[in-house]
Amino acid sequence: MATPSTSYPSFIDGQPVSVSRLSPLAFAGFAHFTAMQVRSGSVRGLDLHLKRLHDASLQLFGRAPAEALIRSYIRSAIEQGGGDQSLTVTVFSPNGEFTSASMDVEPAVFVRTAPPSSGPEGPLRLSAIEHQRPLAAVKHVGEVGKTYFLHQAIREGFDDAAFIDGHGHLSEATIWNLVFWDGDAVVWPRAEILQGSMMGVVQRQLDALGIAQRQEFISLERLQDFRAAAVMNSWTPGIAVSAIGAHAFAVARPFMALLHEAYEAEPGALP
Protein backbone atom coordinates (compact mmCIF):
# COMPACT_ATOMS: atom_id res chain seq x y z
CA MET A 1 0.00 0.00 0.00
CA ALA A 2 1.11 3.54 -0.68
CA THR A 3 2.43 5.66 2.19
CA PRO A 4 1.28 9.27 2.83
CA SER A 5 4.53 10.53 1.30
CA THR A 6 3.98 8.72 -2.03
CA SER A 7 3.81 11.06 -5.02
CA TYR A 8 0.92 10.57 -7.45
CA PRO A 9 1.82 12.51 -10.63
CA SER A 10 -0.40 13.27 -13.64
CA PHE A 11 0.52 13.02 -17.29
CA ILE A 12 -0.62 14.20 -20.72
CA ASP A 13 0.71 12.15 -23.64
CA GLY A 14 3.15 10.48 -21.28
CA GLN A 15 4.74 13.69 -19.99
CA PRO A 16 4.36 15.05 -16.43
CA VAL A 17 1.78 17.82 -16.44
CA SER A 18 1.58 21.10 -14.52
CA VAL A 19 -1.51 22.71 -13.00
CA SER A 20 -1.48 25.40 -15.71
CA ARG A 21 -1.86 22.76 -18.42
CA LEU A 22 -4.61 21.02 -16.49
CA SER A 23 -6.82 24.10 -16.11
CA PRO A 24 -8.35 23.96 -19.65
CA LEU A 25 -9.17 20.28 -19.16
CA ALA A 26 -11.06 21.07 -15.97
CA PHE A 27 -13.69 22.86 -18.06
CA ALA A 28 -13.75 20.42 -20.98
CA GLY A 29 -16.97 18.45 -21.32
CA PHE A 30 -16.12 16.74 -24.60
CA ALA A 31 -13.93 13.95 -23.35
CA HIS A 32 -14.21 10.39 -22.14
CA PHE A 33 -12.31 8.29 -19.63
CA THR A 34 -11.84 4.99 -17.89
CA ALA A 35 -10.91 4.43 -14.26
CA MET A 36 -9.04 1.43 -12.93
CA GLN A 37 -7.43 0.04 -9.82
CA VAL A 38 -3.79 -1.01 -10.04
CA ARG A 39 -2.58 -3.70 -7.68
CA SER A 40 1.01 -4.98 -7.65
CA GLY A 41 1.54 -3.22 -10.97
CA SER A 42 -1.27 -5.03 -12.82
CA VAL A 43 -4.89 -4.31 -13.72
CA ARG A 44 -7.79 -6.75 -13.80
CA GLY A 45 -9.85 -6.31 -16.94
CA LEU A 46 -7.24 -4.19 -18.69
CA ASP A 47 -8.50 -5.38 -22.08
CA LEU A 48 -11.96 -4.01 -21.26
CA HIS A 49 -10.53 -0.62 -20.31
CA LEU A 50 -8.55 -0.43 -23.54
CA LYS A 51 -11.56 -1.42 -25.65
CA ARG A 52 -13.68 1.21 -23.90
CA LEU A 53 -11.13 3.92 -24.70
CA HIS A 54 -10.86 2.79 -28.33
CA ASP A 55 -14.61 2.56 -28.97
CA ALA A 56 -15.45 5.85 -27.24
CA SER A 57 -12.63 7.67 -29.06
CA LEU A 58 -14.00 6.53 -32.42
CA GLN A 59 -17.49 7.64 -31.42
CA LEU A 60 -16.48 11.09 -30.14
CA PHE A 61 -13.46 11.95 -32.28
CA GLY A 62 -13.63 9.64 -35.28
CA ARG A 63 -10.15 8.35 -34.44
CA ALA A 64 -8.46 6.64 -31.51
CA PRO A 65 -5.00 6.75 -29.94
CA ALA A 66 -3.03 3.58 -30.63
CA GLU A 67 -3.44 0.89 -27.99
CA ALA A 68 0.33 0.51 -27.71
CA LEU A 69 0.62 4.21 -26.95
CA ILE A 70 -2.02 4.12 -24.21
CA ARG A 71 -0.39 1.02 -22.73
CA SER A 72 2.93 2.85 -22.59
CA TYR A 73 1.33 5.82 -20.80
CA ILE A 74 -0.33 3.52 -18.25
CA ARG A 75 2.90 1.59 -17.75
CA SER A 76 4.88 4.80 -17.19
CA ALA A 77 2.32 6.09 -14.69
CA ILE A 78 2.46 2.83 -12.74
CA GLU A 79 6.25 2.87 -12.69
CA GLN A 80 6.31 6.43 -11.36
CA GLY A 81 3.24 6.35 -9.12
CA GLY A 82 3.56 3.00 -7.38
CA GLY A 83 2.34 -0.56 -7.82
CA ASP A 84 -0.90 0.07 -5.90
CA GLN A 85 -2.90 3.06 -7.06
CA SER A 86 -6.07 4.40 -8.65
CA LEU A 87 -5.48 5.36 -12.27
CA THR A 88 -7.72 7.32 -14.64
CA VAL A 89 -7.12 7.66 -18.39
CA THR A 90 -8.96 10.53 -20.11
CA VAL A 91 -9.01 11.09 -23.87
CA PHE A 92 -9.78 14.67 -24.92
CA SER A 93 -9.32 17.23 -27.68
CA PRO A 94 -6.28 19.48 -27.03
CA ASN A 95 -8.04 22.20 -29.07
CA GLY A 96 -10.92 22.43 -26.63
CA GLU A 97 -14.58 21.54 -27.18
CA PHE A 98 -16.32 24.64 -28.53
CA THR A 99 -14.61 24.94 -31.92
CA SER A 100 -14.75 22.95 -35.13
CA ALA A 101 -11.00 22.40 -34.70
CA SER A 102 -11.80 19.89 -31.94
CA MET A 103 -13.14 17.59 -34.67
CA ASP A 104 -9.95 17.51 -36.74
CA VAL A 105 -7.14 16.84 -34.31
CA GLU A 106 -5.49 13.81 -32.80
CA PRO A 107 -6.98 13.37 -29.31
CA ALA A 108 -4.63 13.72 -26.35
CA VAL A 109 -4.37 11.34 -23.41
CA PHE A 110 -4.43 12.53 -19.80
CA VAL A 111 -3.39 10.03 -17.12
CA ARG A 112 -4.09 10.85 -13.48
CA THR A 113 -2.89 8.75 -10.55
CA ALA A 114 -4.15 8.74 -6.96
CA PRO A 115 -4.05 6.53 -3.88
CA PRO A 116 -5.70 3.10 -4.23
CA SER A 117 -9.36 2.82 -3.26
CA SER A 118 -11.87 0.05 -2.59
CA GLY A 119 -14.94 2.28 -2.27
CA PRO A 120 -17.35 2.68 0.67
CA GLU A 121 -18.17 -0.25 2.93
CA GLY A 122 -21.94 -0.05 2.54
CA PRO A 123 -24.64 -1.16 2.61
CA LEU A 124 -26.02 1.75 0.57
CA ARG A 125 -29.55 3.13 0.46
CA LEU A 126 -30.42 4.44 -3.00
CA SER A 127 -33.12 6.89 -3.94
CA ALA A 128 -34.93 6.22 -7.22
CA ILE A 129 -34.67 9.14 -9.67
CA GLU A 130 -36.08 9.47 -13.18
CA HIS A 131 -33.00 10.24 -15.28
CA GLN A 132 -31.35 9.00 -18.46
CA ARG A 133 -27.69 9.76 -19.04
CA PRO A 134 -26.97 11.13 -22.54
CA LEU A 135 -24.75 8.87 -24.62
CA ALA A 136 -25.20 6.29 -21.90
CA ALA A 137 -22.76 3.81 -23.44
CA VAL A 138 -19.89 6.33 -23.21
CA LYS A 139 -18.08 7.09 -19.96
CA HIS A 140 -17.88 10.81 -20.68
CA VAL A 141 -16.92 13.72 -18.45
CA GLY A 142 -18.88 16.79 -17.38
CA GLU A 143 -22.05 15.00 -16.25
CA VAL A 144 -23.60 17.49 -13.85
CA GLY A 145 -26.70 15.31 -13.44
CA LYS A 146 -24.87 12.54 -11.60
CA THR A 147 -23.51 14.88 -8.95
CA TYR A 148 -26.79 16.82 -8.71
CA PHE A 149 -28.86 13.68 -8.08
CA LEU A 150 -26.27 12.33 -5.63
CA HIS A 151 -26.56 15.53 -3.59
CA GLN A 152 -30.34 15.42 -3.82
CA ALA A 153 -30.37 11.81 -2.60
CA ILE A 154 -28.18 12.67 0.39
CA ARG A 155 -30.48 15.57 1.31
CA GLU A 156 -33.36 13.08 1.33
CA GLY A 157 -31.51 10.75 3.70
CA PHE A 158 -30.16 8.27 1.15
CA ASP A 159 -26.53 7.42 0.37
CA ASP A 160 -26.74 7.65 -3.42
CA ALA A 161 -29.19 7.50 -6.32
CA ALA A 162 -30.37 4.87 -8.81
CA PHE A 163 -31.80 5.94 -12.16
CA ILE A 164 -35.13 5.02 -13.77
CA ASP A 165 -35.29 5.45 -17.54
CA GLY A 166 -38.14 6.85 -19.61
CA HIS A 167 -39.77 3.40 -19.78
CA GLY A 168 -39.94 3.02 -16.00
CA HIS A 169 -37.04 0.59 -15.79
CA LEU A 170 -34.06 0.75 -13.47
CA SER A 171 -30.85 1.28 -15.42
CA GLU A 172 -27.78 2.22 -13.37
CA ALA A 173 -26.77 4.41 -10.45
CA THR A 174 -24.76 7.65 -10.40
CA ILE A 175 -21.32 6.05 -10.71
CA TRP A 176 -22.33 2.41 -10.38
CA ASN A 177 -23.76 -0.54 -12.26
CA LEU A 178 -26.69 -2.26 -10.58
CA VAL A 179 -26.96 -6.02 -10.13
CA PHE A 180 -29.57 -8.26 -8.46
CA TRP A 181 -29.89 -11.80 -7.11
CA ASP A 182 -33.10 -13.85 -7.29
CA GLY A 183 -31.79 -16.83 -5.36
CA ASP A 184 -30.77 -18.79 -8.46
CA ALA A 185 -29.26 -16.32 -10.92
CA VAL A 186 -27.50 -12.97 -11.18
CA VAL A 187 -29.81 -10.49 -12.91
CA TRP A 188 -28.64 -7.35 -14.72
CA PRO A 189 -30.93 -4.47 -15.71
CA ARG A 190 -31.89 -4.35 -19.40
CA ALA A 191 -31.61 -0.67 -20.28
CA GLU A 192 -29.36 1.90 -21.91
CA ILE A 193 -26.38 1.90 -19.54
CA LEU A 194 -22.64 2.18 -19.41
CA GLN A 195 -21.20 -1.32 -19.60
CA GLY A 196 -18.80 -1.06 -16.68
CA SER A 197 -15.36 -2.61 -16.89
CA MET A 198 -15.96 -4.25 -13.51
CA MET A 199 -19.32 -5.46 -14.78
CA GLY A 200 -17.57 -7.07 -17.75
CA VAL A 201 -15.00 -8.77 -15.52
CA VAL A 202 -17.65 -10.13 -13.16
CA GLN A 203 -19.87 -11.33 -16.02
CA ARG A 204 -17.17 -13.34 -17.77
CA GLN A 205 -15.91 -14.86 -14.53
CA LEU A 206 -19.44 -15.78 -13.42
CA ASP A 207 -19.75 -17.57 -16.76
CA ALA A 208 -16.49 -19.40 -16.02
CA LEU A 209 -17.84 -20.37 -12.60
CA GLY A 210 -21.05 -21.73 -14.16
CA ILE A 211 -23.32 -19.18 -12.46
CA ALA A 212 -26.59 -18.39 -14.28
CA GLN A 213 -26.99 -14.79 -15.48
CA ARG A 214 -29.64 -12.91 -17.43
CA GLN A 215 -30.81 -9.41 -18.31
CA GLU A 216 -34.34 -8.25 -17.50
CA PHE A 217 -36.44 -5.10 -17.50
CA ILE A 218 -36.67 -4.21 -13.81
CA SER A 219 -39.29 -1.77 -12.54
CA LEU A 220 -39.63 -0.60 -8.96
CA GLU A 221 -42.60 -2.95 -8.61
CA ARG A 222 -40.42 -5.89 -9.64
CA LEU A 223 -37.89 -5.33 -6.86
CA GLN A 224 -39.91 -7.66 -4.65
CA ASP A 225 -38.83 -10.53 -6.94
CA PHE A 226 -35.21 -10.23 -5.84
CA ARG A 227 -33.51 -11.35 -2.65
CA ALA A 228 -30.56 -8.97 -2.85
CA ALA A 229 -29.08 -6.04 -4.75
CA ALA A 230 -25.62 -4.57 -5.11
CA VAL A 231 -23.65 -1.90 -6.95
CA MET A 232 -20.22 -2.17 -8.53
CA ASN A 233 -17.71 0.05 -10.29
CA SER A 234 -13.95 0.22 -10.80
CA TRP A 235 -13.43 0.42 -7.05
CA THR A 236 -15.17 -2.82 -6.13
CA PRO A 237 -17.04 -5.83 -7.54
CA GLY A 238 -19.85 -5.43 -5.04
CA ILE A 239 -21.26 -3.21 -2.33
CA ALA A 240 -24.55 -4.33 -0.81
CA VAL A 241 -27.66 -2.22 -1.39
CA SER A 242 -30.11 -2.21 1.51
CA ALA A 243 -32.83 -0.15 -0.19
CA ILE A 244 -33.89 1.29 -3.54
CA GLY A 245 -36.56 3.88 -2.94
CA ALA A 246 -39.11 2.44 -0.52
CA HIS A 247 -38.10 -1.19 -1.13
CA ALA A 248 -35.70 -2.72 1.41
CA PHE A 249 -33.29 -5.57 0.75
CA ALA A 250 -31.61 -7.94 3.15
CA VAL A 251 -27.83 -7.99 2.88
CA ALA A 252 -27.20 -11.39 1.29
CA ARG A 253 -23.62 -12.18 2.21
CA PRO A 254 -23.37 -15.25 -0.08
CA PHE A 255 -24.31 -13.02 -3.05
CA MET A 256 -21.69 -10.46 -2.10
CA ALA A 257 -19.11 -13.22 -1.65
CA LEU A 258 -19.99 -14.57 -5.11
CA LEU A 259 -19.39 -11.20 -6.78
CA HIS A 260 -16.04 -10.82 -5.04
CA GLU A 261 -15.09 -14.42 -5.88
CA ALA A 262 -15.74 -13.71 -9.55
CA TYR A 263 -13.54 -10.63 -9.44
CA GLU A 264 -10.71 -12.41 -7.66
CA ALA A 265 -10.78 -15.12 -10.34
CA GLU A 266 -9.82 -12.53 -12.99
CA PRO A 267 -6.04 -12.51 -13.49
CA GLY A 268 -4.25 -9.17 -13.43
CA ALA A 269 -2.68 -7.93 -16.67
CA LEU A 270 0.43 -5.87 -17.15
CA PRO A 271 0.11 -2.87 -19.50
Image: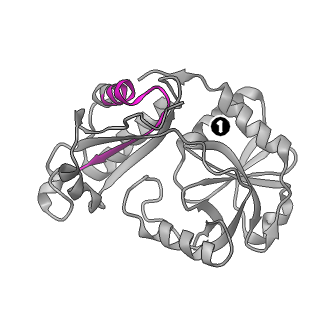
SS class, disc 1:
helix
Q: Is residue 168 visible?
A: no
* Residue 85 lies within the magenta run: yes
Residue range highlighted in magenta: 73-93
Q: Is residue 176 left or right of residue 211?
A: left
In the depicted structure, whether residue 69 falls above or below residue 33: above
> What percent of the width, then of the height, locates residue 83?
47, 25
Residue at horizontal 81%, vertical 54%?
A: 228
Please name the residue shown 68% across and 70% down the image: 158
Query: Which residue of the protein is positioned furthest toward the left in this rendering?
Result: 101
Horizontally, residue 218 falls left or right of residue 140, namely right
Say whether residue 36 is left or right of residue 60.
right
Q: Amino acid at mark 1?
A: Val
Camera-side residue: 261 or 204? Answer: 261
Residue 26 horizontal/vertical position (percent): 28, 58
Quadrant showing the C terminus = top left
Which residue sits at x=62%, y=72%?
154
Asked whether 46 or 23 is in front, the reply is 23
Picture layout, residue 142 above or below residue 38: below
On the image, the x and y values in percent for residue 248 come to: 82, 66
Of all residues, the one furthest to the front in this rendering is: 5
Q: Quadrant of residue 106?
A: top left
**How many labels, in total?**
1
Colour setup of the view: one colour
Pointer 1 local density, CA inside 10 Å: few below 14, some 14–19, many at least 20: many
Residue 190 visible in the snapshot: yes
Task: Give the residue at x 60% y 61%.
Answer: 173
- x and y percentages locating residue 156 in the rendered image: 65, 78
48 vs 124, nearest the viewer? 124
- Badge 1 is on which residue? 202
Q: Quadrant of the N terminus?
A: top right
